[in-house]
Structures are given as C-alpha cells and as structure tokens.
C-alpha cells in the first residue's frame, strides 16, 4: 500500500482518493498531519504549514497541487534532499488561457465602459478598436504561457513572449532575458503574466516597465502578486498610462478587506481562481509522479531549487 499524506480539507482528500484509486488501486490518501500521515510515502500538498515535513521517515517526495513553488522556496523547513514535483495539468493551462482571454477581450471591447453606462441608462458608443493586430505580450511562455500566447495569436493579435532564456514558438515573437525585457514591453497594449516568482521576477512590472507600454495599456496578472510594484501600478492607473488591470494574485492573500484594490474603479479583483486544480484531470500526472518516485526514478516536472521553479 502506498500512503499519500494530503494537506487540505476532507472533501478535497476524498476527491483525490477517488481519482487516484482508479489509476493506483494500492494508493491511500490520508491526512498529512495525522499520526498515520507521519508514516506517509509521499506528500500531496498546496501551501502546507511550516514544519509539515519534519519527522516523516518514509517520505520519498513532495507533489504540489499546482505550478507555483515560491511558497515552498520561502519555507526553510521544506527538505531540499528529496524531489519536489510541480503539477503541470493541461486543464489548468486551458482554464488560465480562458481567464486571460476573457479579461483581455473585455478590455479590448470596452466591456467596463458599457456596463457602467448600462447602469446609468446611457447610450454611449465608443470607437471600436481594430479587430486584429493588437499587441499582446505574454510573460512566461512555458507550459501555460505557450498555450495562452498561441490562442491570442489565433484570435488575430500580434503576440510577443518573454522568457528567461531563448526559445521558439510558432506565430509568437520571443524576447529573452532582462536585456530583452524593454523591447518586449515597448508599445504593448495588453500584458499577460504567468511568470513564476523568483528574485529576478519580483517587481518586474514597475514604473519603467509600465512606461514602455502603449498609452492606455491593460495588465493581466495570473502569475504572482509580488511581480507587480503595487504603488507603481496605482500611479500608472492614476496617470492614464494604464487603462486598467485584472489581478488574480496579490502580495497578501486573501487580499485584505481594506486594500485599495477592492474599490479601485480600474482594477478587477479575482480571488486566485484563474486556474484551479481539478483532481479528475490532474490525477494521471500525479499518479505518474507517485509511480516514478516509488520506483526511485526521476519524475517529470521536478523543481530545480537553484532555478526557483
């Protein structure tokens, strides 16, 4: 029997048990923090508490329920000598691309303007933006970002991608490294970030970055909150350099009730729901990671601690 220590609520644990049992009949999902959980072979978690992995003598690996690893990097109690595996589920890529496109098209077709005028019973048409050729910049063109970039290109946008290192993606102009960030940003009208949080990406969207974008550009952040300098964002929105922003991630989550973003007329707040983990679609990848780790093999999507993701 393979014992998987799960950190989350009982309903989620039951969903994982059902999905994994269909692929690994000898797998049992238990509460990581329980007595039986302390003898687990593997851990399946998202944002576990500090010291969650202390005194787990049988632990062979940690599998995350999502792609982000910054919270694990920040926790010095997470062991560095066993594999840490990210979840890269195509269903999450689809969901995040839907969310990004939803917000981009709502901006591009002036959805907020028309909703506000509907409340006022005012007929106030605006000149329509061009239907093709708008410049969209996607920051982070890995498993999720490449799907987003390709789908924007299919909609007729002129798409740029920014990555840590050079790569190629059909129909997308790629810029790489900090030295390529300025050219990537120059004149972009919509920015979508799905970057991992690393020292290099912290504060990457700041006054200089916003100033390079087209006047009245729109920011969509589905990466991590600290990638945006909040004060610089508010200043750019106030000056009109930015027309608005859709934010799914924040420096502090949940977003404090008194935070200015909640009531800002140019900011759409989403509660970190752009792409939620679905055990039914992610179970096959988790099962494959479990099988590899139990066999002492290298799992796919293992985190590189030195790289930060």
Image: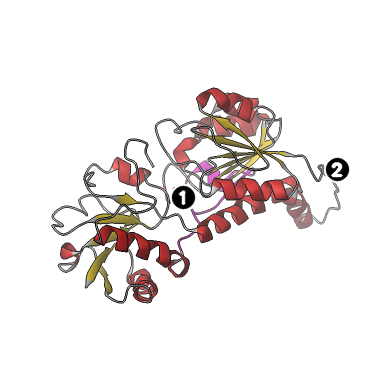
Quarter of the rendering occupied by the N terminus: bottom left
296 in relation to 307, above or below? below
The residue indicated by pointer 2 is: 127
37 in relation to 227, above or below? below
Q: Where is residue 153 in the image (x, y as percent from the top left)?
A: 70, 46
Q: Quadrant of residue 93?
A: bottom right
Tell me which residue sits at (34%, 41%) in the image. 304
Q: Residue 257 carries which label?
A: 1
Q: Where is residue 124 in the image (x, y as percent from the top left)?
A: 85, 49
Q: Which mark is residue 9?
A: none
**In terms of sequence position, does the residue under pointer 1 or pointer 2 come before the other?**
2
Quarter of the rendering occupied by the C terminus: top left
Tell me which residue sits at (25%, 60%) in the image. 295
Q: How crowded is mark 1: few (under 14 residues within 10 Å), some or many (20 or more)?
A: few
Say left or right for 117 vs 70.
Answer: right
Q: Where is residue 268 in the image (x, y as percent from the top left)?
A: 60, 48
Q: In this picture, which residue range is highlighted in magenta? A: 253-277
Q: Which of these two is toward me, 29 or 248? A: 29
Mark 1 vs mark 2: in front: 2
Q: Which of these two is toward me, 71 or 57? A: 57
Q: Is the magenta stretch mostly helix, strand or loop?
A: loop
Q: Which of these two is toward me, 242 or 288? A: 288
Magenta stretch: includes residue 61:
no
Dot 1: element: loop
């Amino acid at each position: 029997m393979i014992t998987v220590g799960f950190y989350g609520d009982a309903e989620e644990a039951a969903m994982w048990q059902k999905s994994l049992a269909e692929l690994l009949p000898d797998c049992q999902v238990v509460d990581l923090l329980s007595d039986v959980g302390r003898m687990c072979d593997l851990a399946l978690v998202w944002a576990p508490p500090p010291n969650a992995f202390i005194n787990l003598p049988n632990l062979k690996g940690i599998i995350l329920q999502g792609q982000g690893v910054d919270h694990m990097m920040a926790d010095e109690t997470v062991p560095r000598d066993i594999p840490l595996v990210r979840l890269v589920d195509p269903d999450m890529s689809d969901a995040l691309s839907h969310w990004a496109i939803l917000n981009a098209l709502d901006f591009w077709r002036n959805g907020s303007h028309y909703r506000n005028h509907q409340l006022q019973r005012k007929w106030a048409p605006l000149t329509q933006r061009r239907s093709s050729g708008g410049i969209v910049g996607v920051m982070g063109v890995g498993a999720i970002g490449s799907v987003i970039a390709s789908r924007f290109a299919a909609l007729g946008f002129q798409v740029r991608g920014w990555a840590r290192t050079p790569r190629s993606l059909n129909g997308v102009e790629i810029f790489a490294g900090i030295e390529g960030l300025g050219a990537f940003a120059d004149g972009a009208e919509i920015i979508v970030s799905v970057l991992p949080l690393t020292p290099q990406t912290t504060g990457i969207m700041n006054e200089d970055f916003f100033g390079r974008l087209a006047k009245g550009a729109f920011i969509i952040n589905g990466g991590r909150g600290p990638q945006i300098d909040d004060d610089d964002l508010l200043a750019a929105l106030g000056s009109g350099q930015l027309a608005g922003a859709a934010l799914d991630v924040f420096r502090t989550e949940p977003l404090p009730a008194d935070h200015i973003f909640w009531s800002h007329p140019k900011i759409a707040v989403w509660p970190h729901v752009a792409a939620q983990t679905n055990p039914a679609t992610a179970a096959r990848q988790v099962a494959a990671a479990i099988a590899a780790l139990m066999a002492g093999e290298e799992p796919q999507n293992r985190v590189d601690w030195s790289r930060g993701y």
